[in-house]
Image (spheres, rainbow, N blue to C red):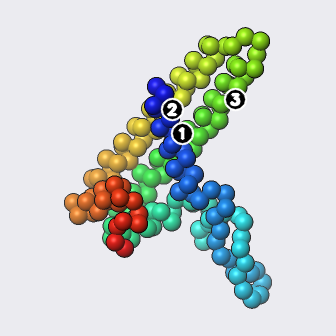
Amino acid sequence: MFGFFFGTLCLIGLVAVAKGGRHRRRWHGCGGGGGGPYRSHVGWEDGDGSRRPFDWLLRSVFRRLDTTPGQETVLRAAADEVRGELVDAKREMKRSRDEIAAAFEGEYFDETKVGESFAKQDQTIENLRKAAVGALSRAHEALDPEQRRRLAELLVNGPRAVAR
């Protein structure tokens, strides 16, 4: 039980590191046709203004795997599904933290409330696990053997070990 909880926390931390935290910057041109770039503090943005922090990572993976547009569609949908579950997991961990704090600050420790909170965490982790397994399965089906080998190498050795 604790291993799953710790693993989830590590996964959330990994996502935060991959996102670049709150301090990711992107160069924008000055409005009104005026000269020069400035640093924006609004976060990573696509051209349409949507915030998609993992798109840079997906584009890098697509480039390294030399994927087709059809493969990219499948991989992006799988990543979006996992991303949605990660957002839900983060929300549930925040609620759990609040519930555990409330159980602790009372006159008597409320073991039932903490147990219910852990049960919700277990369900959230199970949903995340199912989404990840489904996404990996769809990615496996979409890629050819050479692309699967390169992606496996990327997963094992990290992004810097794979030749661009």
Of badges 3 and 2, nearer the viewer stands 2
Q: Residues within 10 Å of mark 2 (few under 14, many from 20)?
A: some
Measured Cα–Cα span from mark 1 to mark 3: 16 Å
The amino acid type found where label 1 is placed reads: Leu
**Left or right: where 116 falls relative to 81:** right
Q: Nearer the viewer, residue 68 or 29?
A: 29
To which residue does mark 1 refer? 9
Measured Cα–Cα span from mark 3 to mark 2: 16 Å
Residue 143 position, x and y percent, is 28, 59
Given the current orientation, which residue lies at the most extreme top position? 108
**Circle 3: element type:** helix
Quadrant in which residue 27 is drawn: bottom right
Q: Which mark is residue 98?
A: 3
**Left or right: where 61 falls relative to 33:** left
Of badges 1 and 3, nearer the viewer stands 1
Q: Residue at (65%, 35%) from the top-left corner?
A: 94
**Tag 1 and tag 2, C-beta contact below 8 Å:** yes
To which residue does mark 2 refer? 5
**Circle 2: element type:** helix
**Tag 3 and tag 2, C-beta contact below 8 Å:** no
Q: Residues within 10 Å of mark 1 (few under 14, many from 20)?
A: some
Residue 57 position, x and y percent, is 47, 63
* Residue 164 visible in the snapshot: yes
The amino acid type found where label 2 is placed reads: Phe
Residue 99 position, x and y percent, is 67, 25
**Left or right: where 134 falls relative to 3:** left
Measured Cα–Cα span from mark 1 to mark 2: 6 Å
Q: Is residue 47 above or below residue 119?
A: below
